[in-house]
Amino acid sequence: MKKIKAFIAESYGELRKVVWPSKESVMASAKVVIVSTVVFALFFGLVDFLLSQGIMGLFSLV
């Protein structure tokens, strides 16, 4: 039981040392993640569409 109390006390002490990001920093990072996710999704969707159309066109020639 002593070890558990020591662990909790040490964990609480370490959490007090953490430098938490500001709300503005978190919002800016979230915007970057959302925008980059949308851009990559559109890019890979376009690549998938073009490749599937190419393969369908290739099979229709056979």
Image (cartoon, helix red, strand yellow):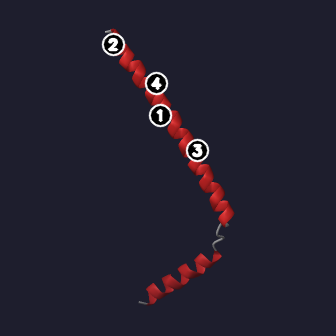
Circle 2 sits in a helix, a strand or a loop, which is it? helix
User: Mark 2 sits on what residue?
Assistant: 60
Q: Which amino acid, by three-letter code, is at mark 4?
A: Leu
Circle 3 sits in a helix, a strand or a loop, which is it? helix
Label 3: few (<14), some or many (≥20) within 10 Å? few
Q: Which amino acid, by three-letter code, is at mark 1?
A: Gly
User: Mark 4 sits on what residue?
Assistant: 50
- The answer to whether residue 29 is above or below residue 43 is below
**Sequence order check, earlier mark of 1 and 3:** 3
Label 4: few (<14), some or many (≥20) within 10 Å? few
Distance between the Cα atoms at labels 2 and 4?
A: 15 Å
- The answer to whether residue 43 is above or below residue 38 is above
Distance between the Cα atoms at labels 4 and 1?
A: 9 Å
User: Mark 3 sits on what residue?
Assistant: 36
Label 2: few (<14), some or many (≥20) within 10 Å? few
- The image quadrant of residue 60 is top left
In this rendering, position of residue 57 left or right of residue 39: left
- The answer to whether residue 25 is above or below residue 55 is below
Q: Which amino acid, by three-letter code, is at mark 2?
A: Ser
Q: Position of residue 3 (x, y in %)?
A: 45, 86
- The N terminus, quarter of image: bottom left
User: Mark 1 sits on what residue?
Assistant: 45
**Sequence order check, earlier mark of 4 and 1:** 1
Residue lying at the far left in this picture: please name it: 62
In this rendering, position of residue 42 left or right of residue 18: left
- The image quadrant of residue 19 is bottom right
